[in-house]
Amino acid sequence: MSLRSALAAVMFGLALVAAACQPAATPTQPAAGPTTTPVTPAQQLSGEIKIDGSSTVYPISEAVAEEFQKAHPNVKVVVGISGTGGGFKKFCAGETDISDASRPIKTSEMEACQKNGIEFIELPVAYDALSVVVNPQNDWVACITVADLKKMWEPDAQGKITRWNQVNPQWPDAPLSLFGPGTDSGTFDYFTEAIVGKEDASRGDYTASEDDNVLVQGVANDKYALGYFGLAYYLENQDKLKALAIDNGKGCVPPSEQTVRDGTYQPLSRPLFIYVNRKAADRPEVEAFIRFYLTQGPALAKQVGYIPLPDTVYQLALQRFEARKVGSVFKGGPQVGVSIEDLLKAEQ
């Protein structure tokens, strides 16, 4: 593994270490600081856990919820899809216990949580390769540059860039049909920051949905379509879609576990998160669920098409949870191509 690979693999782990301003407990022994309720035996655990947020993280949380409920049949885990932004609105209003997020929490969302007395624990759960896809009948593009994507999606393109040959004269004189997440999506936030250069800066004349399955069907049914969403939705529908390699100036790189881990799939590689309500974390069923998520979740994340973090990061995340370490190690929004130095500076 290259030095770059190693840094990429451990950057979130080191961020969590930096975040632990006080000694954290081992995964098997909670920290002495917080008062926690002992987890009752499996047959006695009961209650309801409410999760909402990112459609990208949804497949992971849903898979974890299904397996957890097999072991704890008296616990009901409800997983919704409101998009990252919509999920944080509910979370910061105290309506949910856990918020799925495909980007770090924004400053405005932190303020909303603080206003309502909601403290949160930030936990990374997987890597994603945000995928740009076209219809399989598309035979004129297999690799697309970041510059071409920006030309398609920037605000100035609205009503102007409406045909493929307007992006590249070698492409057909045919309508350009665009599909993407809505403005409540963390994927929208990350993509606009990474491709356009400014968060939330996007043309508005495209087919938008917080449900990635709607986007899949849109691209699958239109020869001249292009869309973007999380890797899992592409992998689930490879017979209906074609993923494009991305050229950021260093050659064409396809989305895959290898290219995410070695840091070459840029700028569309990103971490995925869950945020846990600090008070809810002390409920036995929530406490057990988070422990299950951080120990069984890596294998389940891979099963549903995402890239697990290194084992050491999950161990550190579990320590962070056991210590009930609240707050975010990020700066209030997506951080494209974040380096280890950036994360460590965020804690200073």
Image (cartoon, rainbow, N blue to C red):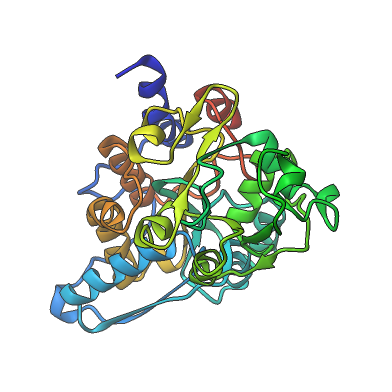
Seen at 66% across and 43% down, the residue is: 171
Residue 62 x, y percent position in the rendering: 35, 69
Quadrant into which the C terminus falls: top right
In the image, residue 22 sits, relative to residue 47, either above or below, namely: above
Residue 253 x, y percent position in the rendering: 46, 32
Res 5 quadrant in image: top left
Quadrant into which the N terminus falls: top left
Furthest residue toward top:
3
Total count of labels:
0
Seen at 28% across and 41% down, the residue is: 315
Residue 132 visible in the snapshot: no
Residue 12 x, y percent position in the rendering: 43, 35
Residue 308 x, y percent position in the rendering: 31, 45
Q: Is residue 226 left or right of residue 205?
A: left
Residue 200 visible in the snapshot: yes
Seen at 24% across and 65% down, the residue is: 38
Judging depth in this view, the residue of 262 and 28 nearest the camera is 262
Judging depth in this view, the residue of 327 and 305 nearest the camera is 305
Seen at 35% across and 22% down, the residue is: 6
Q: Is residue 9 left or right of residue 244?
A: left
In the image, residue 127 sits, relative to residue 90, either above or below, namely: above
In the image, residue 342 sits, relative to residue 48, either above or below, namely: above
Judging depth in this view, the residue of 158 and 185 nearest the camera is 158
In the image, residue 313 sits, relative to residue 172, either above or below, namely: above
Judging depth in this view, the residue of 231 and 183 nearest the camera is 231
